[in-house]
Structure formats: structure tokens, C-alpha cells
Image (cartoon, helix red, strand yellow):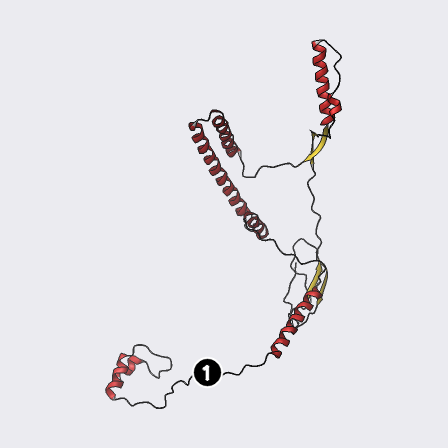
Amino acid sequence: NQNVTRPTHRFNHTLDLIISHGADITNIDILPQSDDITDHYLILYTLPVEQISRVSPCYRHARTILPDLSQSLTKPITDNNLDGMTNNIDLILTSTLDTVAPIRLKKFREQTPAPWYNSHTHALKRTACNVERKWRKTKLEVFRIVYKDSMLSYREALKAARAEHLSKLIENNKNNPRFLFSTVATLTTNQVSEKCVPLQFSSEDFMNFFTEKIDSIRKTIVAVQPLTASPDTISPKTPQLHCFTCIGQEELYDVITKADSTCQLDPIPNNLLKEV
């Protein structure tokens, strides 16, 4: 939908548009600006933005270590029986662990695997981890070579799966430029952070800033005095042609016969002139 219905230019032309799709644009206001900055008008409008729903946090039970509670470790042993002493130690250790690090509900961040991480790459990674454990346990060169080859295969498969996933993603959203630009922005490593204008500055401050800047430039131009050129900087006079030397008939005939191209200003073509 095109929402601008009034002129946006000082010559009563509608040159600036607000095109929306699926959004309700309200409170459209068109304000004329200073001609020193632009001949277009300022367009103000209200765009409602839906509140982004956040994912609910995940919780799980985990032990939390509390401050030092050394007194709980110094319980006296009153039973001389072996089974009683064992049960007493188990009770002391269990109660101490529950006291020092009780089980509490803790929030954790759920990590989701990459969308291109499939069963094939998972199997290659598991194989590489198994070979790595064998190599670190035995310190044999053969396992180190196998581990190196396994990691190389895993990285190549992961790279190919990522490229295939991104290709399908771009192909499926080739008609959605907004999604494509955001995807490219996430893939680029050197992302320049956008400098945001502080909220306390308004459009009038923006207009006044450029108006004052233009006025200061004009005052500077007026204040500058024209520089007089010194005699040394004056370039010497270029030679001028005052007369033409006459040529003979043979020289004229030679010039005409050697001319191959024809100019639009010629009265007749060169080929016809040669025959005449």
C-alpha cells in the first residue's frame, strides 16, 4: 500500500512514498523544510511494531556449593561395628553434600546444534573422538595419523554440509531480499557496528545543524579576498596563425586522393570528389 497522498516536494510533486505490506501506517504528517538543506519535505508517521516473544528459560536441578560448613564434617563416630561405621560415614557424607551443595533449580542456556549438523557429520566426529582417545592413551604414531585423517574428513564434511545448507536457504528465499541481506550479514566476519543517532536529537536539530554549517561556509567564502596573480605566474602568449600559405594544384590533388573518410560537413563525398 502507498500511504502518501499529499505533495512531498516544494513544486507540489509527490516524490517520496511510504510503501507498506501488512502494516498499519498511521499519523502521517508532512512538514516543509528549509531550502538550504533539501527541497523535499519531512515525512513523519507511526509504525506499530509487535513485541518479540522471548523463549522461556530452561531450568534443571543441580548442586550449588554454599559457603564453608566445616562443622558438618566433624560429627563424632559412636558405633564400633563395621557396618554401623560404614552406614555412619555414608550418612555423614550424604548429609554433608546436601548441606554444602544442595540440589537447586538452576537456569541454563540450551544449546542447539547447527542446522547443517546432520547424522553423517555426527558419526565422523564420534569416530574422530574415539581415535583421539586411543592415541592419547597409547601414544602410538599410527593412531595419531588416523586421528589427523579423521579430523580432516570431519571438517571437510562439515564444510560441505554448511555450504549445502546455505545454498538451499538462499535458493528457497531468493525472492525475499530482507532475509538474504540478514543472512549475508550474519555470514560476514567483519561487521561494522552501525552508529545510532542519540534519541535526544530531533529532526529540527538535524536541520539547524546543516543550516548553520551552510551559513558558516558562506561567510567564509565572502571573507576570503581574491588573490591577485603575480607577473611570474602569467603564462606566456601562445603563437597565433595570421595567414595561410598557398599550395599548388599537385599538392591539393595529392591531399584529396589520400583522403579516405568523409565528414558530414563535406558538400560531396570524397569518392565522388576524386572522380570529378
Seen at 46% across and 36% down, the residue is 152
Q: Residue at x 46, y 83 (%)?
A: 232
Q: Nearer the viewer, residue 30 or 145?
A: 145
Please tell me in which quadrant of the rendered image residue 25 appears.
bottom right
The C terminus appears in which quarter of the rendering?
bottom left
Q: Residue at x 69, y 13 (%)?
A: 86
Pointer 1 residue: 232
Q: Residue 256, located in which quarter of the rendered image?
A: bottom left
Give the left or right position of residue 198, taking residue 130 as reference: right
Residue 155 percent coordinates (x, y): 48, 37
254 and 208: which one is in front? 208
Q: Relative to 15, is 261 above or below?
A: below
Q: Where does the image place residue 186, in percent across and percent down from the top left?
A: 57, 48
Q: Is residue 10 left or right of residue 264?
A: right
Quadrant position of the N terminus in the picture: bottom right
Determine whether 157 is above or below 215 in the image.
above
Query: Which amino acid does the dot numbered 1 rest on?
Result: Asp
225 w.r.t. 36: above or below: below
Residue 43 visible to an observer of this rendering: yes
Specify few, some or many for label 1: CA neighbours under 10 Å numbering under 14, 14-19, or 20 or more.
Answer: few
Residue 47: x percent and y percent? 70, 56
Q: Position of residue 8 (x, y in %)?
A: 66, 68
